[in-house]
Amino acid sequence: MIAYLMCIILFSLGLYCILRKRNIIKIIIGIIIAEYAINLFFILVGYRMEGRAPIHAPDQKIVNMVDPLPQAVVLTSIVIGLASIALLIAIAIRIYEKYGTFDITKIKELKG
Amino acid sequence: MIELYILLGIMIVGAIIAIEIKDLLSSIVAVGAVGLVLSITFLILKAPDVAITQLVVEILALIILIRATLKKDLPFSTSGRWYFNTLITISFVALFFIVGVKCFKDLPAFGYPIMNVAATYLKDGLAQTGATNIVTSVILDYRVFDTLGEATVLFTAVIGVLAIVRSIGRKKQNQKIEEEDE
Amino acid sequence: MSREREKGMSLIVKTITRLTVGLILLYGIYILSHGHISPGGGFAGGVIIALSFVHLMLAYGKETALKKLPKTVMSLFESSGAILFLGIALLGFTGGYFFLNFLPKGQPFRLFSAGIIPFCNIAISLKVGAGLFAIFVALVLLKYEKNKKD
């Protein structure tokens, strides 16, 4: 239960960073931290006490295995996260080229 | 499980440093540290596939972030409605936190998951697919449509990046120079 | 000679890169081809293969890396990865339904086992590796253009 609590603290930190910071790169960092927290939460839900990794071995002793389903879901989620972060960074670089700043309060004038 | 709590504590401290430090490059390095500790946490939680993927993806994300933000400064301004904005943000995050904590009682206890579907995968996975790695047999046999959708999302993201980054034809040179002169 | 040395990083980095880049590529191929019997798989293997080319590009500059893997070849790899994945899926119709594991399962714990799963891994790794390297190249080329103007 404490592990869930710390995981949601991590997500709240990411949410605070997204909502409060003004620099675009800081906002992207907040998105990355929130994504880490969500991935970690999936793996935490699937953990099993005294279990082993879900890979069969020829001479295995322990029969309990952890839940393989959240791991499979998170595995695709990580790669998608990298691609979406690259997309965000491309947009941020374009904004920097056009306005010369990363500050979102200075980008109010939309001049086409 | 004391090492799990230590690693989670290190991740929280690293996240606070990454959020609050003034220098952008130091902030990105702190995010990289959080990602590496997350990789070790996955290894402790018995998820080696996810740990390997997290490690290599973290390295690539770090390189891309550093390439994007090298030699850029961080504007720091406390003008505007500073107290008001901070108050609104903190109250919203606190509300979210309280609601999230209230939802915990519906979750299974830590270490004892509900494994209705996964029990079938673990029992029949080796016989039905022939793969000894159950995670691979889930993502490439039982739930392969998920992977197909993931490939589509990745393709769309690559096309999006190339479309945003692409320089526009012949008019580009004159236009850009004009804009920089302004 | 001196102009070549100016591009990319110093001589030490270049020498170490020449020694290690093949090993990194080989490790990526190992990770992806053994994905069904050990930890790893198409995603991690593809990202490691992309990282080996990123390594080459960071050390030697963009010309050398793009000579090894030009943009047309990159887009060809990505498209062929997608088409290979869909083709494997469509071949399942020979036995009944989409994504049927139609090949013989083979013996567990052997490299050639598990039917279509190794081929799916190869397709996904082609797609992921080429796609992520394309993203990296696009971002780096944009940076270079901006530096040239300054």
Image (tube, rainbow, N blue to C red):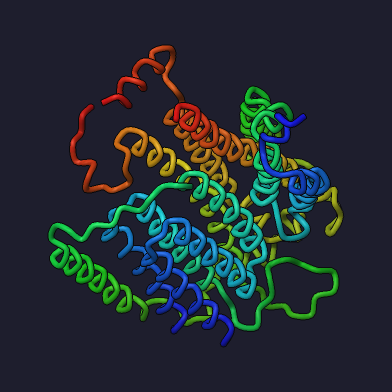
Q: Which residue is painted at 42% across and 19% down in the image? A: B168
The N terminus of chain A sits in image quarter: bottom left
- Left/right placement of residue B4 relative to residue C60 reads left
Would you say residue B43 is visible in this rendering? yes
x and y percentages locating residue A84 in the rendered image? 45, 45
- Left/right placement of residue B127 relative to residue B31 reads right
Q: C141 and A58: which one is in front?
A: C141
x and y percentages locating residue C54 in the rendered image? 65, 42
* Residue A61: quadrant of the picture: bottom right
x and y percentages locating residue C147 in the rendered image? 49, 32
Q: Is residue A48 above or below residue B62?
A: below
Would you say residue C114 is visible in this rendering? no
Q: Which residue is painted at 65% across and 83% down in the image? A: A50
Q: Which residue is painted at 65% across and 36% down in the image? A: C85
* Residue B4: quadrant of the picture: bottom right
Q: C93 and A15: which one is in front?
A: A15
Q: Is residue C47 above or below residue A96?
A: below
Q: B34 and B67: which one is in front?
A: B67
Q: Residue furthest bottom?
A: B2
- Left/right placement of residue C88 relative to residue B72 reads right
The C terminus of chain A sits in image quarter: top left
x and y percentages locating residue B145 in the rendered image? 55, 44
Q: Residue furthest front?
A: C2
Q: How many marks?
A: 0
